[in-house]
Image (cartoon, rainbow, N blue to C red):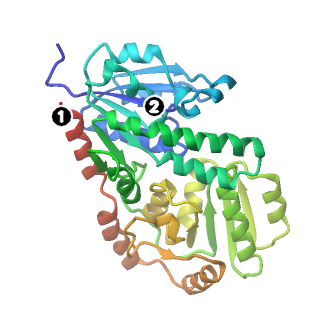
Amino acid sequence: MNNTSEKHLHIVSFDIPYPANYGGVIDVFFRIKELSKRGVKIHLHCYEYGREHSEYLESFCYSVNYYKRDTKLGKLFNPLPYIVCSRDSQELLENLKKDDYPILLEGLHCCKLLTYEEIQNRNVIVRAHNVEHEYYEHLAKVEVDSKKKLYLKQEVAKLRDFEPVLNKAKAILAISQKDYEYFSSRYKNVYKVTAYNAYTEVDILEGSSDYVLYHGNLSVSENYRAAEILVETFETFDVKLKIAGMNPPPHLVKLIENVPNIELIDSPNDQVLFDLIRHAHINILVTEQATGLKLKLLNILFNGRFCLVNDKMVEGLDVNGLCYIVNDSNSIRFAVDELMPRKFDAHQIERRRKNMKKFYDIDEATDLLMKLITEN
């Protein structure tokens, strides 16, 4: 018999969520921290494939278990999506069967578990990090390698076919308004739960600086393509642009090296990137795909001065008073010209603080999650 005075929760993560250094695991890790603060005893189950085991996770979790992700080439020919069939563990299933605690599955990646009868009467909640087949469809469009493009196209069809397994979940947690509208039109018990991140208080430096910053994982095609467009925009523009990110491709390095007003910061650590964001006069973020809530946007809104975004970056988000919308090179230049002479003063900081309280409420999200995991 379980102790009903204690709240226990199994969390099944698609990856080891520490260090929290990319979008998906940031959401997982800081959700774990918030639930731990509320007294939830978390039984964390992580699929591992390249990241090291983390003792730090044990300070927030009642237990931590690891399972090898099966990344054999043959999995590519499985009728299930590769991101799903490579995360299927009998050991995990047996561990979940030892009690009747609620289960939070992080992403469609972990939803093979929903196909097992043994847990279909359990309180199983799914965190939807994306509409996965739409995300993969975009990746396929921008991929230039023919073999990768074929894999991505096949994964799109498999993900679309597999997604109805969500009917077996007791609740689905969508990450943005756009995703909420998609899932709620197809499934029952869908809730909007914002992305968890490291920052919950606005902490912005007053004043100004002389550069614009773009940052992102530059090994990702969407991000280095955005960087290329910004290089074209700024190379004939008398304003400093800094581009920072992990593993920039050689062609981007070469593109930037002879442009005097553009600097590439290759693979900065967390502290260097944080300082770049805080000291930039303007942070700019652009995306070709409107998916979820970008965690780097939250980072900038909590810690950075002026923020320029394109409409896809904030599609489905109420960012009134938080960002300036720019959708082409001319509008970027115009906005930069307007903002560079202006200081980000105490009035601007207080305005950001008030607007962020309306835009992002992590306590409200956690209240809802606590309610869902305590329901039978």
Q: Residue at x 37, y 68 (%)?
A: 318
Quarter of the picture containing the N terminus is top left
Kind of residue indicated by mark 1: Glu
Along the line of sight, which residue is nearer the eye, 88 or 331?
Answer: 88
Image vertical order of residue 232 relative to residue 171, above or below: below
Residue at image mark 2: 110
Q: Residue at x 58, y 76 (%)?
A: 327
| Residue 375 - label | 1
Left or right of residue 9: residue 239: right
Q: Residue at x 47, y 48 (%)?
A: 130
- Label count reads 2
The earlier-in-sequence mark between 1 and 2 is 2
Which quadrant would residue 254 be assigned to in this image? bottom right
Left or right of residue 12: residue 334: right
Quarter of the picture containing the C terminus is top left
Along the line of sight, which residue is nearer the eye, 245 or 281?
Answer: 245
> Is residue 228 visible from the viewing direction of this image?
yes
Kind of residue indicated by mark 2: Cys
Q: Where is residue 32 shown, x and y percent of the image? A: 36, 36
